[in-house]
Image: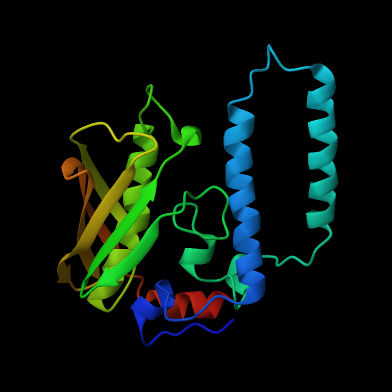
Amino acid sequence: MSIDTGDPIRSWFPQDAEPTDNQLAKHELADHLRALIGDVLRLNSGATDPEDLHEAHMLLSQARRHIGALPKVSSLFASEQDFSLFERSPFSGRGNALATPLQVQFVGDEMRAHTTYGDAYEGPPGTVHGGHVMAAFDDLLGVAQAASGQAGFTGTLSVRLVARTPLHKRIDYEAGVESVSGRKVTAWGRSYCEGELLAEATGIFVVPKGGLYEMLAAES
């Protein structure tokens, strides 16, 4: 595996490289799975014909066997194409069906992102589960810290939930670096819906001795 240790932003944010045709096809598969997760969740089990459920099960089993027979990697970190956070992340990964995914870009030294959460992320009625709201900040601030010129692991994350995060509406994010002290990077983030502040976060990230990219390269 080749890791660009000289440019943390490029290592963690690969939009300067166009996806290959195979990557685009993988993204489409992930999109189908995202929609399928919502469809299965909304199934009315009491009103659905058992034969229809059995047919759906057989079709999905067939699809899974087909995909399961395709080439795999032992770890996504071992894949040149799929290594990047924005291919594999459970929050912003375009190839990860667990992700919404978050659409992310750097604007100068700050990060902007947006997404829309579907039914699979529901906690209270019509609202994104608070645990997912907080976990998304971990992912976003973890990317934003790269603007400091280095990157580390999450040390602490504090999130203040100001208002509920609604389902099926565009949620906007902003994040950036507040300070750098030795191997400690402090990042901030906020989320909004239609201009209303929903949540704000502060994260402290600790860079491993010798640097994160050197550590990853040594372990690959």
Pick the front one: 179 or 162: 162
Residue 153 appears anywhere in the view: no
Figure quadrant of residue 167: top left
Which quarter of the image is occupied by the N terminus?
A: bottom right
Locate residue 104, reporting x and y percent. Answer: 36, 63
Here the colouring is rainbow
Left or right relative to 92: residue 170: left
**How many discs mark residues in the rendered view?**
0
Which quarter of the image is occupied by the C terminus?
A: bottom right
Residue at the spot 31% in from the left edge and 50% down from the top edge = 137
Figure quadrant of residue 188: bottom left
Left or right relative to 22: residue 112: left
Residue at the spot 21% in from the left edge and 48% down from the top edge = 201
Left or right relative to 102: residue 185: left
Locate residue 35, reporting x and y percent. Answer: 59, 42
Residue at the spot 38% in from the left edge and 50% down from the top edge = 115
On screen, residue 53 above or below 35: above
On screen, residue 211 above or below 173: below
Pick the front one: 26 or 182: 26
Left or right relative to 184: residue 13: right
Residue at the spot 41% in from the left edge and 27% down from the top edge = 123
Locate residue 98, reporting x and y percent. Answer: 54, 47
Locate residue 61, reporting x and y percent. Answer: 82, 41
Figure quadrant of residue 169: top left
Pick the front one: 28 or 109: 28
